[in-house]
Image (cartoon, rainbow, N blue to C red):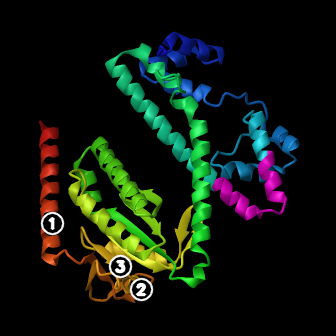
Amino acid sequence: MSSMPVPVAELVTALQAMGVSEEEIARARADGNLVLLAVERLALGQELVYDVKEACERTRLPEEELRHIWRSLGFPDPPAGDPVFSEVDLGNLEAVAELMHSGVVSPEVTYGMTRVIGSSMARVASALVDAVSAQTERATATVGEEEVAEVLEPTTSGTDGVLPMFPAVLEQVWRRHLQVAARRRLLRGDVDDGPGLVVGFADLVGFTALAQQVSDAELAEVVDQFERLAYDVVVAGGGRVVKMIGDEVMFLVDDPACAAEIALGLAEASRDAAELSDVRVGLAVGPVIEREGDAFGATVNLASRATAIAYPGTVVVSPDLRELLEPHPEFAFRAMRPRFLKHIGRVALSVLRRADDAPSTIREAIDERRSQMREIVRERLATRDT
């Protein structure tokens, strides 16, 4: 039997019971933000009863150390005397302090872990609020206020709603990623025995110009489509997305041939996506410093610089990576004239392509793609002006 949406009156009653003023509730209803207000007040579900001094006494942490841990989790410094910690918060702070002082891991590693946890959870929370907000707007526009509260309730199939289901999902996804990360390190073995990792960057050509010509909503759609494309192609090819920075993705791959396929796949898939401009890709292989979910080092810098000089719709590879890929008959190369790369020096890069792709065919595809994008922008501008 399907569950009925919770009447808005019940949300209002719950908010009133928590001491939310009638004025704030009325303003949230008028703005269509009642569900977001409920999320903000009901999500934690814990009473905040301890200020900094009391938290230090309970956890036996020096004040500066407690504040440092709290900041590393991504939260602002709590004002003195304000009750900002719950019992659960203190339990977690005690656990972090015990880990830090046990000698199992160093304080630097502990702070690094808390920074990763904080930044990752902040992104998850932001994405969830965006989803709830979008659902609220759709529900308000189509079926009225009484249906809006559905996002806080069980679904029609009897399973948990959007908010209640997330803790279990996050725990399971974390466990799976922990398993994958451990397996990856085991299979990689001693990094000194091999050529290192392949680092790749891919970015949308002309993104800055496009941002000047389309609305914020349309630009967000482009970024979202590029992000979906990047995750699909990189992960399906055996790589790992390190981070997305708007119109650019950074990824790591253990196997050079897989990295080449991913890079070519990104360039090819962008040509087939009507809303995306050409993607250019840079690849380099070598030692990489991995820390807190990010990657650093000379190999990363080389891949980034190679991307910046790549032509739209092409893949540029470093000399060492070309040497590793040359035994593979499915790939072909075109040497570029040596380029001077900032902070690196003169490097002889190469354009990577599939062996059965004639250079003229690739050039024609890129030119056609540019024409398509110009037409899309013209249509958008014409629509906006009418």
Q: Nearer the viewer, residue 17 or 127?
A: 127
Check the image and report above or below for 270 versus 155.
below
Residue 33 location in percent, x, y? 46, 24
Give the residue type at disc 2: Asp
3 or 1: tag closer to the N-terminus: 3
The quadrant holding residue 76 is top right
- Mark number for residue 317? 3
Does the rendering let one see residue 206?
no
Residue 222 location in percent, x, y? 30, 49
Residue 313 location in percent, x, y? 24, 67
Where disc 3 sits, the SS reads strand
- Mark number for residue 320? 2
Check the image and report above or below for 258 versus 222.
below
Q: Are marks 2 and 1 in contact (CB under 8 Å)?
A: no
Residue at image location 70% in from the left, 29% down from the top: 46
- Mark number for residue 365? 1
Give the residue type at disc 1: Ala
